[in-house]
Amino acid sequence: MRPHAPSAAVPRAGGGAATSRWIRCPGCHDLLYAEHHRRNLMVCSGCGHHGRLGARERVDRLFDPGTATPLAAAPTLADPLGFTGYAGRLERARDDSGLPEAAICVSAFLNGRRVVAAVMDFAFMGGSLGCAVGERVTAAAEHALATRTPLVVVTASGGARMQEGALALMQMAKTAQAMADLDEAGVLTLTVVTDPTYGGVAASYATLADVILAEAGARMGFAGPRVIAGTFGQSLPEGFQTAETLLAGGLVDDVRPRGELRPALAGLLAAAGWAAEGRPVPHTWKDTGAHLVRHPAALPERDAWQAVALARDPGRPTTLDYAACLLEDFHELHGDRMSGDCPAIVGGVGRLGGVPVVLIGHQKGHDTRELAARGFGMGTPAGFRKAARLMRLAGKLGLPVVTLVDTPGACAGVEAERGGQAHAIAANLRLMSTLPVPVVAVVTGEGGSGGALALAVADRVLALGNAVYSVISPEGCAAILWREAGAAPRAAADLRLTARDLLAHGVIDAVVPEPDGGAHRDPALAARLLGGALTATLHELARADPAELVARRRRRFRRFGLA
């Protein structure tokens, strides 16, 4: 997708003034009927190019009609440096845009839920961040803090306002501090990145939100392409700094076309409201775990090597399969905000029987192509950091965490080691031991080594009937101890890795039965059985005091290995 630019009017024959009925798309250069283009939210119906919207148009598009109320901000210095020509530029920007500054702040409703919003307008001096914009964004954040209302920021900026010197630079720290206050108070923050978002805005409040959505084709970065090319003489790769490239690099949570932004925000806001509503859980959930098996004697003895084969069957439901079956309005979130978006670990927010949860799990696949694309479910450092980021979001918003474990182990490649694989796993173990929300882990297939445990430090650990869980794979054990690949079945038996063995040792708390022949024979039934186990378990945990939850979780793991 080409960089955005304002839609160009089509010149009349002979080079006269432009008409207003037809415009030319800057992306594909097709002719567009102006009124239809406007009704299509300034998105080209041919190539999908997103034209720019002003701040007032954004407010009208994103929020419930007639609900936006302006928020006041303290007066700021108009021309603090007496910069040459600046006062005149400000006056022209106000006249041209009809706005007092490059951001407007409102209290509004989105799908019936109250939000505070700070919306930027690139048409006002390139959306530059100066004292007035910084004060408006900070005032909006302070209003969100005082009212415990989610904050939505819509960004569009070329960077800090040079005409205000170091005072403009200070707005970066000022707004970042306001975002930190919202983090400490547990108030949800959401950013919508629009084209372009650069410089001081990208390096402060735009990228500090809990969830970052980017409009399709939007560009974001610290230094713009011209600065990089001019300063360092570097040629820039295709798609440099576009939303799609940022998503692949783990720097934004999702990329959506303009028409999908409102429903995406609405789903996230609904999840954030659950804790404020008293964490209601359906009373009927207490009866949904009737099939859970809690005593080893109630489970059949089975050959360990056969159990391993069943656990690895490529037809078994994956995390995303379970999400599709069990969760309403599941919104997958991406990236570790540092280095990448690991495809082997997925996660997001959805509603389980109306109750919002954060779901995180290993993602394998059902054929060789998908397995290879997903790294065979073996998480990288970026994957474990993504999981940790989503767990922290759950802790901030008071949402239960559900993890689905199905991995041969953590990725052991050179790049994973360079990326700090051991550090990432260790950080997750520590984080999960401190989360102040209910955590339920389910081993749905393979539970291999530290790559499994990094998602399984939980209040309740369940396993499907044909799942396995061990310190190492049978093949790895056989190779190390007996140096004989054919000894893997013997290793499987000695490792006591079946669900029955795990329940006997207290490693898991209960077993979720599978359909006859395994979960791959009837994935829909397997999902229903898992859903019942999750709701029954969450009913036990949802209203527990956070401090007691953490204390019990730590006691659970403290006792392992004691005589």
Image: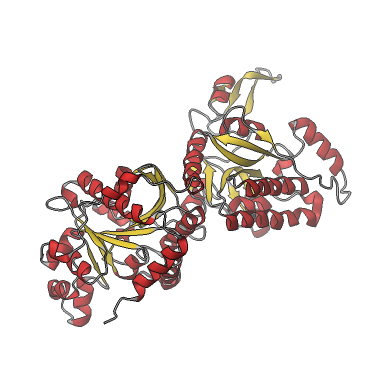
How many marks can you see?
Answer: 0
Q: Quadrant of residue 431?
A: bottom left
> Which quarter of the figure is the C terminus placed in?
bottom left
Q: Is residue 429 left or right of residue 9?
A: left
User: Which residue is at the front of the view, 499 or 532?
Assistant: 532
Would you identify the image quadrant in which residue 505 lies? bottom left
Give 65 or 29, whichever is nearer the viewer. Answer: 65
Vertical arrangement, residue 562 with respect to residue 150, above or below: below
As rendered, which of 533 and 328 lies closer to the eye? 533
Instruction: Judge whether 382 appears above or below 30 on screen.
Output: below
**Image x and y of residue 2, in percent:** 54, 40
Q: Residue at x 16, y 71 (%)?
A: 492
Relative height, residue 509 to residue 193 (above, below): below
Residue 477, image x, y percentages? 22, 76
- Whether residue 476 sits left or right of residue 79 in the image: it is left
Residue at screen point 64% across, 32% down: 68
Q: Is residue 345 left or right of residue 178?
A: left
Above or below for 239 versus 62? below
Q: Write the residue at 48% across / 54% down.
A: 398
The answer, for residue 50, to whether it is visible in the render is: no
301 or 166, which is in the foreground?
Answer: 301
Image spot of residue 382 (x, y percent): 44, 62
Residue 33 seen from this side: yes
Q: Residue at x 10, y 66 (%)?
A: 303
Residue 545, percent from left and from top? 45, 60
